[in-house]
Image (cartoon, rainbow, N blue to C red):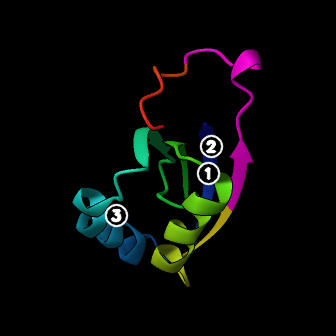
């Protein structure tokens, strides 16, 4: 399943240091095929592939605590365009 996460970042320096540090440490059941970052580094929109919203939330919330408020949106692939080929089972 695909999940979009809108990150409202309150601590850009801390947040992007965490992203850099954790990029190679993702659990094997999560994949981040796309992300876009606002010019002011205070908004990031990520497209994740995950087994569930709950699983993704369990990983991201501790990592972003105090640096970002996150909104999770389960994607309806039948009404979406441009999604990558799914790989996570």
Q: Which mark is residue 5?
A: 1
Give residue 37's position: percent from left, percent from top. Answer: 47, 47
Give residue 47's position: percent from left, percent from top. Answer: 53, 40
Q: Farthest residue to the bottom: give it.
A: 66
- Reply yes or no: does residue 14 show up in magenta: no
Residue 2 appears in which quarter of the rendering? top right
Please report the residue visible at 62 percent of the width from the left and 44 percent of the height from the top: 4
Of residue 42 and residue 65, the one placed in the foreground of this image is 65
- Residue 25 left/right relative to 48: left
- Reply yes or no: does residue 75 show up in magenta: yes
Q: Which mark is residue 3?
A: 2
For residue 85, above or below residue 74: above
Report which residue position mark 3 lands on.
19
- Which portion, as a residue range, is magenta? 71-82
Q: CA distance from mark 1 to mark 3?
A: 14 Å
Asked whether the residues under the numbered discs 2 and 1 touch, taking CB atoms below 8 Å apart as contact, a structural biologist would say yes
Question: Of helix, strand and loop, which one carries label 3?
Answer: helix
Q: CA distance from mark 2 to mark 1?
A: 6 Å
């Amino acid at each position: 399943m695909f999940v979009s996460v809108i990150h409202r970042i309150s601590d850009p320096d801390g947040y992007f240091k965490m992203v850099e540090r954790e990029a190679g440490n993702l659990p094997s059941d999560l994949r981040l095929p796309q992300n876009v970052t606002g010019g002011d580094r205070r908004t990031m929109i990520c497209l994740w592939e995950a087994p569930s919203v709950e699983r993704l939330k369990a990983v991201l919330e501790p990592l972003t605590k105090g640096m970002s408020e996150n909104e999770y949106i389960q994607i309806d692939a039948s009404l979406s365009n441009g999604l990558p080929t799914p790989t996570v089972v």
